[in-house]
Image: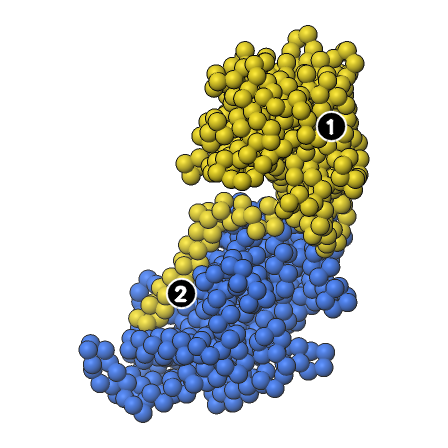
Chain colours: A yellow, B blue
Amino acid sequence: MNKPLRRIAIFCGLLVLALLVRTNWLQFVQADELKTDPKNRRVDIARYAQPRGNIIVDGKAVTGSTVVNGTDFKYKRTYKNGKLWSPVTGYASQRIGANQLEKLYDSFLTGDDDRLFFNRTIDMITGKPQKGGNVVTTLNAKAQKAAYDGLGDKKGAVAAINPKTGAILALANKPSYDPSTFAGVSGEDGEKFKKLDDDEDQPMLNRALRQTYPPGSTFKVVTAAAGLESGDYDLDSKTDSEDPYRLPNSSTDLGNEGNNPACKNASIRVALQWSCNTVFAKMSDQLGNDKMIEEAEKFGFEKDVKGGTLDPDLDTPVRPAKSIYPKDNRPQNAMAGIGQASNRATPLQMAMVASAVANDGKLMKPYMVDQLVAPNLNVVEQTKPEELSRPVSSENAQKLQSAMETVVEKGTGKSGQIPGVTVGGKTGTAQHGENNKDNPYAWFISYAKTSDGSPVAVAVVVESSDTLRSDIAGGKLAAPIAKGVMEAVLDGKH
Amino acid sequence: MSNLTNTGSNTTVSSGGLPSRRNTELAMLVFAVLVPVFAYANVGLAINDELPSGMLGYGFGMVLLAGVGHLVVRRYAPYADPLLLPLATLLNGLGLVLIWRLDQSERLRQRAESLFGSFSPDAPKQLMYSAIGLALFVAILLLLKDHRVLQRYTYISMAVGLVLLVLPVFFPPVNGARIWVKLGFINLQPGEFVKIIIAVFFAGYLMVKRDALALASRRFMGLYLPRGRDLGPILVIWALSLMILVFETDLGTSLLFFGLFVIMLYVATERTSWIVFGLLLSAGGATVVATFEPHVQDRVQAWLHPFAKETIESTGSDQIAQSLWAFGSGGVLGTGWGQGNSDLIGFAANSDFILATVGEELGLTGMMAVLIIYGLIVERGVRISLAARDPFGKLLAVGLSGAFGLQVFVVAGGVMGLIPLTGMTMPFLASGGSSVLANWALIGILIRISDTARRPAPAPAPSPDAEMTQVVRP
């Protein structure tokens, strides 16, 4: 009986060996994969085991962390004035996950980032808990507040940029949401999120970055830029524009607001001043679809997916929605020249248009993160301003500035005036819905200029307001908000 | 067949006086007590930053259990294998610490409170069962002077074994498997005891029938195939184990039961054909049952796709995934006692899945150590079988250690995702009275057989002839 016994001994040995091999496989070969599997709750436990790094605006944190009991996630996110800052920070919810800056810099905020390896190691050796780094934004607290308060209880968004650097100064959204309400892990947090998510007013839609609107008359600045760049037009020479203008290949006549007699054959300056549809529709048609697309692209339109790979050009680092100027037929292209066809733009995009003009034709890449700071206050990463493109020559940019300043000085944008400061702007009232049956969008884009260039360019859009329709013109609704933002930025400069 | 004349170096049998090795056993017992006591202190320090309040009681309990065990072995089985008692004590002690550690888990406490309204710690119960288990061990050594006595109960064992196997069918299933017998306040898992009783039956039965099974056969393609009528017993056992699977939905017991029979049949007859035949039968049976038994399908699904969302939804549990995450998160060195999150497994964290806590908190290192301890127990068992001088003892010893080894493989393999999970307890480590009692009984019987095997042969009776020739009278 001993021969089979020895074989049984070997068999049992093999069983144990199989278990040993398996445990080595699991705990050595696959260990990292299992350990970092996002579905492994330990990943989240470790992640919430220490306070999260903060997002900083003007030297003050707009986020925080608080200890919660009754769950294995020790710290949860809090937000100071969450509704004001949520378009910038995004949310970090234990139940839902994170988005925007909270998501993009997640590993830096938790302290897991490779760039914090040294800090982490020191903390581990000295027995201190891991600390997260801080994300310092470029935002201007006063400008943000002016934008948010300015929107009041109207739906809309504001984007403000420093034209010289591309640094984003304000990014406001109405209606907004407070991300602290669902930062935890409980079912209640989930319900609160769902309620916000299902809300018809879309408080979680970041309109300034992620919503595109018909740009309306503010787009005329782009058309004017294309006209000047073509060399076929000049700022103050009369154009050959009939009023009303019959759209090409069509029997539709296009008129002007209040049938303004100044629009007939108006120069670019005058046409901008009175926002003449006829002049810019015809200009867009004469330049042609291709040239218009080319100019719009230089201003940042159509930047999204290029050759199958994501084009990160416009990442702020939160990626804005793509503003578009599509290929279209002649009548549509003519209408697109006045921002009233298939072209769409985000508030950020229109702020970029204003900023490129204000910065003498140089378009800077917009960004909202200035520095990444390690827990020991070392600056780990510093964003350097980058030039994105030159949509117009410096000479033409100055011509456009002059025209836009005329708009504010004695045109449709008077309510954007700031005493003692040169302001250039352009109003817009974009039709909304078929045959303009919904309340239109009120737009205003502008910049302010000081002796050493322009410190701020703003785009404001106010969605369908309850105000009487006749009242809704960019000049009335949107310009005062833009003015408030510009003043807030200028205040800081003085 | 008999091993009496074997003088090879791989057997401990010798007619000469062997060292009893009792002092070796004692020295190792000291470690087997110290290691869990330190582990216990470690858990307390890690979780509450202080030595656990039950430190003295627990330490004293461990010393008492080990001391009594040792003294009884020293007195009643002086030639017994010196490794088995320390190894079993170590595992039992570590099991107690692991269970106590999981009792401290806030998560499991909340889970129990929300499911059953209250939480009761398992460690005190397990300590009590360990004491009863050791009492059973002592009783076996005191009452069973010679393991061959068991041979008399061959057919009674069969009857008792069958009754125990069938009994759970009449009780409501717990968590999908009918493996429990609820008698008032006592819950028994008869499957744990069946492995011993059935091993006794197989040993007795095969000892009688092995010649018929071994010799009467036909040669076919290099294999000795048994005659049709000799196939009877194996087919009966096979059918029985399939019935267990179908009616009790207990994959583990079914597998253990059949595997045990094949191993013992092979040892008894020395015919490889039985192994081949057995493997074919079990593979065929398992495949057929898996096609219509949803419980088995769930287990296979969870084994093949542990992390898939569909698996977790269809089986209603992510135990396997949680277990694998626990093992992976432990890595090579583990998180340390009390610092893991293996309690995320929830249900059965301190019984079937207790190895996951070993894996996470003690790491690969601890897992290797624990698996090797199990391996050592099995190999000592087979060695006792080699050393035993009577065929009944040989068959019983290999049956018991084979069953132990299969159980370890089936549970550990299931928990680690090597094979489908079967729902059995990890011997000695897992929380559960039946398991502790049965395994102490198993160790008791093995110690008894090894004592008999290593005991010096009685001095040859004085031969009158020899005396005559030696006496020279002037």
Q: Nearer the viewer, mark 1 or mark 2?
A: 1
What residue type is disc 1 on?
Gly
Q: Label for residue A189?
A: none
Task: Quickly name the residue at label 1.
Answer: A475
Give how far across and how far down residue B249 sits, in percent.
Answer: 53, 78
Q: Chain of mark 1?
A: A
Corner quadrant of residue B100: bottom right
What residue type is disc 2 on?
Cys
Q: Label for residue A12?
A: 2
Q: Is residue A205 above or below residue B326?
A: above
Q: CA distance from mark 1 to mark 2?
A: 87 Å
Corner quadrant of residue A251: top right
Neighbourhood count class around disc 1 (C-alpha, 10 Å): few under 14, some 14–19, many 20 upward: many
Looking at this view, name the residue that lies furthest to the bottom: B229
- Horizontally, residue B350 falls left or right of residue B399, namely right
Q: Nearer the viewer, residue A435 or A172?
A: A435
Neighbourhood count class around disc 2 (C-alpha, 10 Å): few under 14, some 14–19, many 20 upward: many
Q: Quadrant of the C terminus of chain B?
A: bottom left
Q: Which residue is at 49% across, 73% downward?
A: B296
Q: Secondary structure at mark 2?
A: helix
Corner quadrant of residue B418: bottom left
Q: Which residue is at 68% across, 30% downward?
A: A259
- Horizontally, residue A299 falls left or right of residue B264, namely right
Q: Nearer the viewer, residue B266 or B446?
A: B266
Q: Which residue is at 31% across, 75% downward?
A: B276
- Residue A160 seen from this side: no
